[in-house]
Amino acid sequence: MSVVPTTYSVGHPGASGSRSITTNQYAVTQQSREINEQTIPGIFFKYDIEPILLNIVETRDSFFVFLIKLVNILSGTLVAGHWGFRLSDWFTEVMGKRRRSGVSQGMLGNKGVYHND
């Protein structure tokens, strides 16, 4: 069993409304083996107390930071939608050119000129 000391803090540390809880986090590894006449049956625990302290601080952003994040999300969605629209437009244009059969295209996209002699 591995034990990690942990402190949860709500609010800014040192502020008047901040609260903190000191606790531990546990991680368990299970091992088992068959016993024979020479081994002692039982349940054995080995504790490893980690030499670190995990400090988790929960804070809230200001309303201005929230607005900036919201604008970033909306603008990223609009840009991704525009890319999708442009790719779908390009794809339909390419597929439309391939479906036209019997029409020759020139080097610059103009119809080819045929001479009937």
Image (spheres, rainbow, N blue to C red):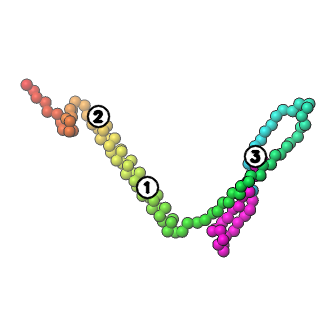
- Label 3 packing within 10 angstroms: few (<14), some (14-19), many (20+): few
* Rendering coords of residue 99 (x, y %): 28, 34
Q: Distance from label 1 to label 3 (Cα)? A: 42 Å
Asked if 26 appears above or below 93 in the picture, the reply is below
| Mark drawn on residue 28 | 3
Residue 39: image quadrant is: top right
Q: Is the magenta stretch mostly helix, strand or loop?
A: strand
Asked if 82 appears above or below 102 in the picture, the reply is below
Q: Which circle, 1 or 2, is nearer the viewer?
A: 1
The single residue placed furthest to the left in the displayed view is 117
Which residue is found at the position 75% from the left and 43% from the top? 29
> What range of the chain is rendered magenta?
1-23
Amino acid at dot 3: Val
Residue corresponding to mark 1: 76
Which residue is found at the position 33% from the left and 45% from the top? 89
* Rendering coords of residue 49 (x, y %): 77, 52
Asked if 18 appears above or below 76 in the picture, the reply is below
* Rendering coords of residue 72 (x, y %): 45, 59
| Mark drawn on residue 98 | 2
Which residue is found at the position 71% from the left and 61% from the top? 7
Front position in the image: 23 or 47: 47
- Label 2 packing within 10 angstroms: few (<14), some (14-19), many (20+): few
Amino acid at dot 1: Gly
Of labels 2 and 3, earlier in sequence is: 3
Q: In this view, does 36 lie to the left or right of 55?
A: right
Q: Is residue 115 left or right of residue 108?
A: left
* Rendering coords of residue 14 (x, y %): 66, 71
Assess whether mark 2 and mark 1 are in contact (beta carbons under 8 angstroms).
no
